[in-house]
Structures are given as C-alpha cells and as structure tokens.
Image: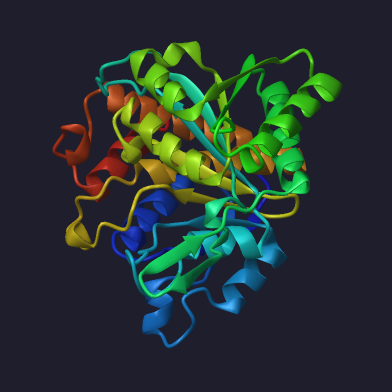
Amino acid sequence: MKTRDIVVIPGDGIGPEVTQAVQRILEKAGASIEWIEHQAGLTALASGADVMPQETLDAIQHYGVALKGPCTTPVGKGFSSVNVQLRKKLNLYAAVRPVRSMPGVKTRFENVDLVIIRENTEGLYSGVENEVTPGVVMSMKVASEVACTRIARWAFRYATHRQRNKITVMHKANIMKLTDGLFIRCAQQIHKQEYPNIAYQETIIDAGCMRLVQDPSQFDMLLLENLYGDVVSDLCAGLIGGLGVVPGANIGDEHAVFEAVHGSAPDIAGKNVANPLALLMSAVMMLNYIADQHGDEGARAVATRIRTAYDQTLEDGCKTRDLGGELGTDAFADAVIDRLG
C-alpha cells in the first residue's frame, strides 16, 4: 500500500479509545497511513474552537479522506449535529451503509446482505425551521432535481460497480407528492435512461419497513431521502446485531468521510468496554475507497486482510459486551491483530 495522508477525527465520548484501537489494527495489518489529527464536537469546544472548526474542514478538503469517531449531538437544544455540518459543508451527498450478517453474531435473520444509500444534504435535515407563532413551529422539507438525480445516479453506479442486482426506492410520495414525487421521478429516469439492466422497484416507506422486518432477503439495495435513510439504516442494523457491527461512509465527488454510525456513549467512555468494530469496518470501507480512487491494490489487500481477521475473531467467539461477549476495547483489538495472518 502506498503511504497516504488521512485526516482522523477521534470525536468524543468513546471516540478516542475506539479510534486508537482501530489505528493500532491498521498499523499491524500493514496500512501505510500518516494520520493528520483534527478535532470536532465536544473536544473542539473544550479547546476553545467551534464545534466544527474550519481548520478541520480545510484539512479534509486538502487530503480528501477522513476517518471519524462518534461525536455527541445534544437532543432538542444546543449546537447542530457535527455530522450534518460535515455532510453539507463538504457536499458529501451519498451516505453508504452496508449491512450484512456477521459470523458468530446470532440474530433472528441469517444471510442478511443489504446496502442502504441515503441522500445526505436535503430533506428535513436541511435544518430550515422557524417559529410561525408562539407554540407553533415549522420545518421545511427541501428537495431539488439536481440532488435527487445525483444520488440516484450514484446509487445505480454503485450497484453496477459492486455487482448488486436490484434497487428499491422507499418513499412517501402518496402523501408528499412534490418532494418525494420528485425523488422517485428522478430515480425512474436514471433507471430507464442509463441503467435499465439493474432491477428497480418502489415501495411506500411504512409498508417497506414492515417487509424488511418480515424478510430482509427480498431486498438488495435501498435508496432513500435523508430522514428515511437515517431511520431505515438503523432499523437494518438491528437485523444483524445493532450499530456496533455496521460501518458508514459519507461520499461526495471530491471528498469522503468514513465513520462509526453509533453514538458517543459517554456513560461508558474511558472504561475500555466500547466495541471498536463499527469504526474498524468503516476503515475497511475507507481502504477500499482509496483502492477504487487511486488504483492502489495494496490498500484493497490490507482491507481484505482486516475483514478476514475480524470475521474470524467473531466466529471464534471473541466479542465485546454489546454482542454478548466479555472482551474490552483493547482485548478485542488484540484478538483481531492475532488473526491478521
């Protein structure tokens, strides 16, 4: 693998400890990375900076790729989400979350293999809210033809590259005829004009969620607008053991940020019990992205080596507490390192 400069944002809560564990595994696996550390979230605030420092954004723009630990987002008050700010300011319009059954993690379903693609910049997450009159507030759902077409094309291109067979668009166009109607019309157009070889279907979101929990094997790739994608991707994580075993990526035309999709879990921070697997899986996605973007097959080889190792670790019963095991953060990292081969 060629040496790469990559921005790392440890985050807060359990972020720094799972980030350190992942960096250690990557080093032992042969990933040649120079880490450029920057802050965001509570750690940035504690140092007197803004919650999303401009220097962090500038670094990601300069180096192109970042690995990010979880950052705390206050509920109902306080500063806006670091994740939302990153996605909007860097135009990371495609959120990608692969969801697959993991060896040694027993759940209700077997052989789950889904990819959720979420539009990352519009919808209700545009943050356009105001108080109409005391006691009455309004939130505006934003949809543009440019963004809807862009994410549809990105999803079909991903399906082709990854040899996926079918895309299902989940929507509520029976009620939100303009916004969700635009979303499905753009997807229909891209399918018909550019990717007719990929199977395509649509389902109303509530019925689609019911079908997911009945039998996830009937789906392959899901394409959703912002809020729906956020909710459904967590639902799908629940099919395979939770957010601790699911990676995430936010990708634009020029930059990409790979992150653990779970929260910062401040109640267990510093106790060496957090599961680093989700961030490790995100790092594997990052290495594959680097291989795709730069033709660096050495990066892909390291990614395959790490994935094989953590699959074997789980199959051998070496798990953290959230998955029914007894290992702590460092012990799990050691177990993966022992199986790198």
**251 or 176, which is in the foreground?**
176
Query: In the rendered image, is residue 267 in sight?
Result: yes
Quadrant occupied by the N terminus: top right
**Spot occupied by residue 190 in the image (x, y as percentages of width and height):** 79, 28
Residue placed most toward the observer, 183 or 1 = 183
Quadrant of the frame with the C terminus: top left
Residue 118 at x, y percent in the picture = 57, 40
Classify residue 3 as left or right of residue 234: right
**Residue located 65% across and 41% down the image:** 289
Whether residue 35 is visible = no
Q: Residue at x 36, y 41 (%)?
A: 277
Its colouring scheme is rainbow
Judging depth in this view, the residue of 303 and 184 nearest the camera is 184
Q: Measured along the vertical axis of the image, is residue 291 above or below residue 201?
A: below
Q: In the displayed image of the protein, which residue is found farthest to the bottom?
A: 48
The correct choice, above or below, for 193 with respect to 276 in the image is: above
In the displayed structure, does residue 151 sit left or right of residue 67? right
Q: Quadrant of residue 245?
A: top left
Q: Residue at x 67, y 44 (%)?
A: 290
Q: Position of residue 243 (x, y in %)?
A: 34, 40
Residue 48 is situated, as x and y percent measured from the top left of the image, at 43, 88
